[in-house]
Amino acid sequence: MLPLERRSWLERQVLLNKKVDIEEISHQLNVSQMTIRRDLKELESEGKVIRTHGGAISPKSLTEEMSYSSKKSQHNAQKKALAKQAVTLIEEGSTIILDSGTTTLELAKLLKLRSDLTVVTNDIKIANELLDSPLKVIVTGGELQKGVGALYGSATQQMLNVIHADIFFLGAHAIDKDNGVTAPTFEKSLIKQMMIKAAERTWLLADHSKFDNKAFANVCALSQLEGLITDDQIEGEILRDYESKISIWVGGD
């Protein structure tokens, strides 16, 4: 196979499978891994792939963050089902951290009438939802991400450095079986990492649309999480793939 033909074939494989593995491809084509790396480097320069450790992914797999209004309108029923499942994990008297996001907002709505919890969040929408609730609510402070409602920056980090929580509900921007949880910016990934560190246990909340995607910045491996809560719209094959990596609860109406 000529170099041009090989690169064209690689491009098709990335589009079909969303990613390729250098070691697997080198065996399949009977060429060196260095040759495949050079091919992928060339394809990346043309904007056709994004190289990763050990392979490459499709640019379409690298998801960007949407505004709050856009996210709010997507998969509402599934987000409510996830929240109903998540609330069963919260013991009386717990201190919980709610990550920013529309799924964790649905969880906050289910907690409004409780008076035995302390809720820490970096999301002004969640804080507003709990404004008149009997809960003790702590807002991290920080710089406001306009259009999204999340708080981040040094003030947020300082707060997270000095607190301890029983459980953290992590919102997912993108999940990949091999690359774990990723976020659209380095700043957001850092905040999520600090929340994981501040809590005894972390549960990931992610509807089916978040699976097999990757964003810019790494948050954590799936092995670092207590478990994952998703909805019943997830495909059986995908569910089985991820169950080898993490304990999964499936919520439904």
Image: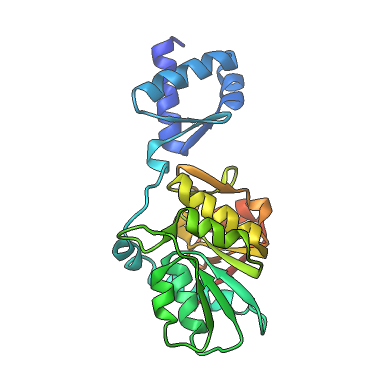
- Seen from the viewer's position, the closer of residues 31 and 249 is 249
In the image, residue 226 lies at what x, y percent? Answer: 68, 62
Above or below for 133 versus 90: below
Q: Residue at the location (42% across, 83% down)?
A: 131
- In this view of the protein, which residue sits in the foreground, 61 or 185? 185
Could you tell me residue 123's position as x and y percent? 43, 67
* Colour mapping used in the image: rainbow
Viewer-proximal residue, 1 or 125? 125
Identified at 45% across, 24% down, the residue is: 10
Residue at 55% over, 18% down: 29
Where residue 146 sits, quadrant-wise, is bottom left
Front residue of 209 and 135: 135
Q: Is residue 153 above or below residue 47?
A: below
Residue 166 % position (x, y): 67, 71
The image quadrant of residue 102 is bottom left
For residue 213, say whether it is visible.
no
Q: Residue furthest top?
A: 2
